[in-house]
Image (cartoon, helix red, strand yellow):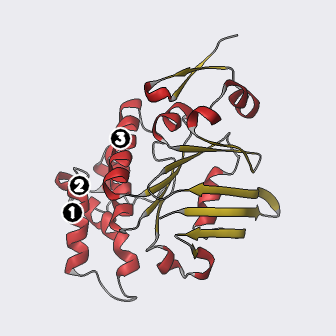
Amino acid sequence: MTVLVRDLDVALGGRPVLNGVSLDAPAGSWTAIIGPNGAGKSTLLRAVLGLVPSHGEVTVAGVDLGTLKPRQRARLIAYTPQNPNLPVGMTAFDYTLLGRSPYIPHLGREGARDRVITAEVLDRLDLTAFAARPLGHLSGGERQRVVLARALAQQTSVLLLDEPTAALDIGHQQQVMELIDRLRLSDELTVVTTIHDLTLAGQYADRLVLISAGRVAVAGEPAQVLTRAAVEEHFDARVRVTPGAGGRPVLSLERP
């Protein structure tokens, strides 16, 4: 499903955070939102979900999300926050099962189908062995996979992932990014992520959107966005940009 954002404005506490932001995320693509700290990346995802007040238009497959109730939106888009609430005593299975909430009647309980879907998702992510384990007993990489499992249990065609590799070491970062890419391709998912690591963004995303001071500074293919000039201007960093696999940009810091 294609995600379109048009002229999105967000103000929090009377302070403008996003101003006239537009982006296109074609069906089946991976769009990465990058930008310096405080640029409004996470706020953009939350605004798409209707979690913060905004002005503008957000559509998924032509459907205006502003016309939908939260449960209806949750059947179209799954979202993982940067710092999810992970009850340490809850098992991986029960946490993943929470992804079925949009399909469970109010005051109702999950059914056999919900539990089957949850088990299938855990199996796909190689988490079956951890299903009965409390979240507090999992490693950082395992917890990140469980958070992704909960999103997949919603069975949506769009995933919004806020910093999915935050606080992970380089090995687990790569594992999570590879997992997201495999799921995107196999399930024909539209993926929109925020990501801090510019090289990771350039290696995996089809399209980058650079947010700076609440506006879209530049958008396009990774090689068009991750230029030496753009990084210096918006991140105040001196870098060398070299082509990697498939011509995708790889960034390295330059010492003065």
Which disc number belongs to residue 124?
2
- Circles 1, 2 touching at the beta carbon (< 8 Å): yes
Secondary structure state at the residue bearing disc 3: helix
Asked where in the image residue 249 lies, by quadrant, the reply is top right
Amino acid tagged 2: Arg
241 and 247: which is toward the camera: 247
86 and 254: which is toward the camera: 254
Asked where in the image residue 89 lies, by quadrant, the reply is bottom left
- Residue at (72% x, 26% y) in the render: 229
170 and 193: which is toward the camera: 193
Horizontal side, residue 161 vs residue 128: left or right = right
Q: Quadrant of the C terminus?
A: top right
Secondary structure state at the residue bearing disc 1: helix
| Residue density around tag 2, few if under 14, some if 14–19, many if 20 or more, within 10 Å | few
Horizontal side, residue 106 vs residue 51: left or right = left
Pointer 1 residue: 120
Q: Is residue 54 visible?
A: no
- Could you give the CA–CA distance between mark 1 and mark 2, rounded to whole angstroms? 6 Å
Figure check: 131 above or below 60: above
Q: Which residue reaches farthest top?
A: 256
Secondary structure state at the residue bearing disc 2: helix
3 and 51: which is toward the camera: 3
Amino acid tagged 1: Glu
Which disc number belongs to residue 178?
3
Q: Name the spot of residue 219 as percent of width and height, x first.
A: 65, 44
Which disc number belongs to residue 255?
none
Of the image marks 3 and 2, the number of the one nearer the N terminus: 2
- Could you give the CA–CA distance between mark 3 and mark 2, rounded to whole angstroms? 14 Å
Amino acid tagged 3: Glu
Of the image marks 3 and 1, the number of the one nearer the N terminus: 1
